[in-house]
Image (spheres, grey):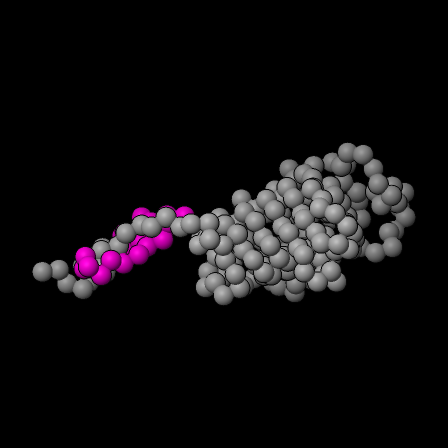
């Protein structure tokens, strides 16, 4: 007769073998034998009441990366809400290799993406893969400011997200106050920096939009 310890070990092994988008269920009729059950799209859509986010393909509501529930975002593809990272001690964003879309239809006073006042933040590379930001009428899209250590890795300088929303952030390896040469084309801010003329402010809020915009 198997002991409770043996049963628990079996449950642990089966749990580890049960990969996303599957979850582990218990069948009481078979002595707690664990099975893998495929998760539907609805079951992979997560709201604010979720306990963790590892299985979430879609998250609805404000996403705060420093929240312990959001340490694992490897399966996240779409966010219907705000991305808010403010006054944290994080160095990097959570790994979000599949994130393609953010849609924000809530309070127009707040941007879809806010990354501000993070003294240790060095990289926002996880947002470089974004393909689409969908906004409601009059909504702001992205605000990135007051992150003194933040820089953009050279390999991301030509991504659509960086070119549209993070041109004011220096390239990693370039001294502060110097303009990166990796941007193609020019803008009024780039020309001002090249001429030694300071910009009016270090934070740029871009993207007032009255329509769905693809980046």
Using residue 92 as the reference point, say whether residue 164 is left or right of it: right
59 lies left or right of 137:
left
Based on the picture, tell me whether residue 13 belongs to the magenta stretch. Answer: yes
The answer to whether 26 is drawn above or below residue 176 in the figure is below
Quadrant of res 105: bottom right
Rendered location of residue 52, percent (x, y): 46, 60
Position of 57 relative to 68 (above/below): above
What is the quadrant of the C terminus in the image?
A: top right
Magenta-tinted stretch = 11-31
**What residue is rendered at 28% in x and 52% in y?**
35
What residue do we see at 71% from left, 57% from top? 111
Image quarter where the N terminus lies is bottom left
Left or right: 78, with 53 as reference point: right
Q: Which residue is drawn at 30% across and 56% down?
A: 25
Numbered circles on residues, count: 0
- Is residue 2 something one can see in this rendering? yes
Horizontal side of 85 relative to 193 (left or right) equals: left
Magenta stretch contains residue 186? no
User: Where does residue 71 sit, x and y in percent of width and height?
Assistant: 50, 57
What is the quadrant of residue 112 in the picture?
bottom right
Whether residue 142 is visible: no
| Frontmost residue, 124 versus 45 | 45
Measured from the top left, where is residue 181 in percent x and y?
77, 36
In the image, residue 180 above or below residue 70: above
Pick out the residue farthest to the top. 184
Residue 85 spot, x, y in % from top left:
63, 60
Identify which residue is drawn at 90% across, 48% down: 197
């Amino acid at each position: 007769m198997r002991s409770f310890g043996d049963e628990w070990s079996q449950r642990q092994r089966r749990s580890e073998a049960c990969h996303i988008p599957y979850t582990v269920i218990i069948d009481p009729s078979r002595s707690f034998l664990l099975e893998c059950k495929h998760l539907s799209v609805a079951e992979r859509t997560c709201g604010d009441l979720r306990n963790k986010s590892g299985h979430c393909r879609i998250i609805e509501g404000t996403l705060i990366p420093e929240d312990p529930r959001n340490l694992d975002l490897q399966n996240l593809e779409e966010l219907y809400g705000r991305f808010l990272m403010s006054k944290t001690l994080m160095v990097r964003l959570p790994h979000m290799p599949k994130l393609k879309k953010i849609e924000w239809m809530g309070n127009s006073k707040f941007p879809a993406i806010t990354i501000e006042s993070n003294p240790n933040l060095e990289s926002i590379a996880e947002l470089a893969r974004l393909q689409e930001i969908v906004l409601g009428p009059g909504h702001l899209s992205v605000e990135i400011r007051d992150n003194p250590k933040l820089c953009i890795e050279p390999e991301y300088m030509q991504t659509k997200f960086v070119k549209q929303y993070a041109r004011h952030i220096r390239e990693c390896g370039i001294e502060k106050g110097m303009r990166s040469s990796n941007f193609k084309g020019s803008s009024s801010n780039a020309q001002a920096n090249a001429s030694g003329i300071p910009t009016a402010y270090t934070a740029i809020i871009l993207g007032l939009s009255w329509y769905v915009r693809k980046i």
